[in-house]
Image: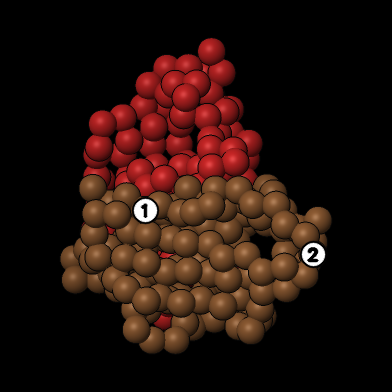
Chain colours: A red, B brown
Amino acid sequence: QKEVEQNSGPLSVPEGAIASLNCTYSDRGSQSFFWYRQYSGKSPELIMSIYSNGDKEDGRFTAQLNKASQYVSLLIRDSQPSDSATYLCAVAGGTSYGKLTFGQGTILTVHP
Amino acid sequence: GAVVSQHPSRVICKSGTSVKIECRSLDFQATTMFWYRQFPKKSLMLMATSNEGSKATYEQGVEKDKFLINHASLTLSTLTVTSAHPEDSSFYICSAGRDSRGAADTQYFGPGTRLTVL
């Protein structure tokens, strides 16, 4: 079982729609959760961090965390073609304190 | 804030040469820096964790004598790929950990260095 799992996609949504990205993790001691966006040929860019159960909103992005279910998600509202990228879920804490464990990434395509 | 620079952005070298990559945190002090490599269409693979003033901690399977890491100050870490071979060609990315909530686990990534070994 992979430590951090994401649907690899590709996920395709029309412009203006809500894109929903999901991630599960295996280490119950994990404490910090991150979503990074990576454009092709570029390095990851931090979009959201979340530490407590519930929702955290930042502009068009909402991160949701459910530690009991070991599940974290990212919602992108009003999706734009510029949102097309690979989204990486990363988890820290627990047995890998200070290090990030990445999922394999979900490719998102927003078509006009 | 939280800007990390990396230099060079791209390097092409001959087999057998050594290549040094610099990673700098520009607007914060990073006690911990991380080095990753990424192959096409794959996720990031952590190579080593670098702490200022101490030896780097390498992940299993990463040759410490081949990938030399130095973390001389709170804003600079270097990765030297020694005696590079074509199989070392990859995208190398550093990140700097910034303290958040008492845990230095928020990582900000540099722009990456694309290494091509001929």
Where A104 sits versus A14, above or below?
Answer: below
The residue sitting at 66% across, 69% down in the picture is B18
Same chain under badges 2 and 1? The reply is yes
Left or right of B26 in this view: A101:
right
> In which chain is the residue bearing label 2?
B
Dot 1 falls on a residue whose secondary structure is strand
First reached walking from the N terminus: tag 2 or tag 1: 1
What residue does disc 1 label?
A: B4
What residue does disc 2 label?
A: B15
The residue sitting at 46% across, 77% down in the picture is B70
Q: Position of residue A65 (x, y in %)?
A: 32, 53
Which of these two is toward me, A15 or A37? A37
Q: Are marks 2 and 1 in contact (CB under 8 Å)?
A: no
The residue sitting at 38% across, 36% down in the picture is A75
The residue sitting at 33% across, 58% down in the picture is B25
Q: Residues within 10 Å of mark 1 (few under 14, many from 20)?
A: many
Label count reads: 2
Which of these two is toward me, A14 or B38? B38
| Residue type at tag 1 | Val
Q: Position of residue A23 (x, y in %)?
A: 48, 53
Q: CA distance from mark 2 to mark 1?
A: 29 Å
Q: Which mark is residue B44?
A: none
Where A39 sits versus A22, above or below?
Answer: above
Where A94 sits versus A2, above or below?
Answer: below
Q: Quadrant of residue B115?
A: bottom right
Which of these two is toward me, A86 or B53? B53
| Residue type at tag 2 | Ser
> In which chain is the residue bearing label 1?
B
Q: Residues within 10 Å of mark 2 (few under 14, many from 20)?
A: some
Q: Position of residue B88 (x, y in %)?
A: 72, 64
Q: Position of residue B1 (x, y in %)?
A: 23, 48
